[in-house]
Amino acid sequence: MMSNDMMRGSAKEEYLRAQSAGLREKRELEAQGLSPYPTVLEEAFPGVSKVSGVSLPLVEIPADRIVGTVTSGRKSTFSASFLPLPEVGSEFSAKWIALCEAHLSDTGIRDPIECIEYLGNFYVREGNKRVSVLRWFGAVRIPAKVRRVMPLEKDSPRAEAYEEFLDFFKATGIYDIQFTKPGKYAKLLTALGKKPGDPWTEQEKKRLVSAFTGFKEAFAPFKSKDHALLAEDALLLFLKVYPFGQLTGMTRQELKKALSALWPDIVTTSDSGAITVKTTPDDEKKKSVISKLIAGTKHLNAAFICQNDTERSAWTRGHAEGAAYLAEALGDSVSVKTYFHADTPEDAERLIGEAVSDGADLVFTTTPQLLDATLKAAVKHPKVGFYNCSACQPFSSVKSYYCRIYEGKFITGLIAGALADNDLVGYVGSYPIMGVPASINAFALGARMTNPRAKILLEWSATEIDCVRKFRERGVRVISNRDIPTADASGLNQSYIGTFTIDGDGGLTPIASPVWMWGKLYEHIVRSVLSGSVEKKEHAVNYWWGMDSGAIDIALSDLVPEGVRKLAETMTDKLKRGELDVFAQRITAQDGSVISDGVHPLSSLNVLRMDRLSDAVEGHIPEYGELLPFSRALVRALGVYRDRIPPEAER
């Protein structure tokens, strides 16, 4: 048994080591321009400490969630992580050493600390030195008397996230996991196979805490001070690739290896503004001599993964035809193979794995619903190039691609406006996903160009509304419906395709439609890989190409009046030459706010994320609950409001 003198000497040595570590942390934080001391609640959130709050039963709180003190009285005696700073011989050091002796003895430190909990973090009112000693010796949890204070700002995203935490805490009693944006606790529950309101066993709670603690420890060395990365957010992305059951079975070394493979994606998904949107293909004629010399790649194997098949899905047929076009355009430089019926997550993962085993250098997955399976494969096969047909995606391992269909909608809009003799134009929206509000607004701008009185009546095919029937009942005689998803303009002969008119007898006459030229898009991407100009995997890149690249075109019926046809052709030529910005004019939203001031150009990301409708439009963007079940998976993947959509637990 250690004597009192030996214990006192040992405690003093511990203080010296802790003080040395504290001084080092203080210097490092000061060098970075950061505060070297614990956060003071009253300084960070004035007035919080005076709010009455709710007293909780005695609870063991996560030690790393203790981030500061209530007042500034003892602020300068600790470094940011509660390491001691005063010299040995001070009154402070004597008290710290005495507490250390108690901790090393059979008695231990028994008295709980007192603190205020605010937004999931703890601020010590009484017991700072106990926190310092216990954390120095690696305590994971510390007994505490807690007063919980609710957020003073009720409508902020952080306050919304905290409200969701309270529901999570009520079910689990887990303080460790703290998201700062709303919607993420629901995503976590889905990843764990749980639903809101499901009961939790003690074993399930311990398993989650243990898994997150191990994940957080493995995550810490990766975290760069240049990124505001949270282990919680990284965990959500991690669980997309490695299911929870797999995470719990990983060794520390396996976890580090998995995090290393996923790290570029963790970094890019942490910054919503880090997406690079490329709106034009690389110009091969301007490519430097050096880049041509180092290109090196002479032949590529390209695989296309499709949902459904060409008989039942026009969308799949368009991509299959694009793959065939690619094979013909590049000849011996590329081999193409197409895989169908990736209709479930399991089928998608199997087919992508089959494509990689077959030697694919490039894998194109042709719907947004295939993104998760694509990401899993991309992390496991970093030497293969993966592309997913979607927009505004933040992943570095998977590049996304889509077409600027709003340019075609602008052209069909000006035709529709000219033909609407009663000033009413019906517009059938497809899904409330990224880029669709921009298409609606561009269509409205085109209609107002030829008919300043035009009113765009908006309905959605993704809801239970019979859109065309409703338009007929309102006397609408010009309607914009879904586009031709293939390069074959003969699709315009189908009565419900594109923009069409309704005659007095109810007959439908197709007039015009945007046309998706997937083959041109695939040709541009593969040529960029062959030439060595493809972007590095450290960046989140979205290819979003339009008429100036040949990825979008317009099909016009012979029934379009000559004057209107000439105007449409003139505007189309301007778009193809890159001389027209559809949104470079003042655009006012339905609520009177300004979408575009006409002076400052909208960025590509702003256009993609556009979520307000022009005041020329009568209708609204449907909420998730208004959508038909078949459309919900796509909207969860690419929806305008996808961050606010409650995930659905699916198996």
Image: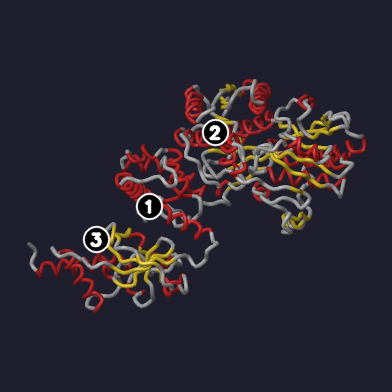
Q: Amino acid at mark 2?
A: Leu
Residue in view at x 88 percent, y 43 percent:
422
Q: Position of residue 178 (x, y in %)?
A: 42, 55
Q: Is residue 457 left or right of residue 2?
A: right
Q: CA distance from mark 3 to mark 2?
A: 47 Å
**Disc 3: CA contacts within 10 A as few (<14), some (14-19) or many (>=20):** few
Q: Which residue is mark 2?
A: 370
Q: Are marks 3 and 2 in contact (CB under 8 Å)?
A: no
Q: Position of residue 231 (x, y in %)?
A: 41, 51
Q: Position of residue 287 (x, y in %)?
A: 66, 38
**Disc 1: CA contacts within 10 A as few (<14), some (14-19) or many (>=20):** few
Q: Position of residue 17 (x, y in %)?
A: 24, 65
Q: How many marks?
A: 3
Q: Nearer the viewer's eye, disc 3 or disc 2?
A: 2
Q: Which mark is residue 220?
A: 1
Q: Amino acid at mark 3?
A: Phe
Q: Is residue 178 left or right of residue 90?
A: right
Residue toward you, 215 or 152: 152
Q: Is residue 260 left or right of residue 78?
A: right
Q: Are marks 2 and 1 in contact (CB under 8 Å)?
A: no
**Label located before the other in sequence (3 or 1):** 3
Secondary structure of the residue carrying tag 1 is loop
Q: Which residue is mark 3?
A: 137
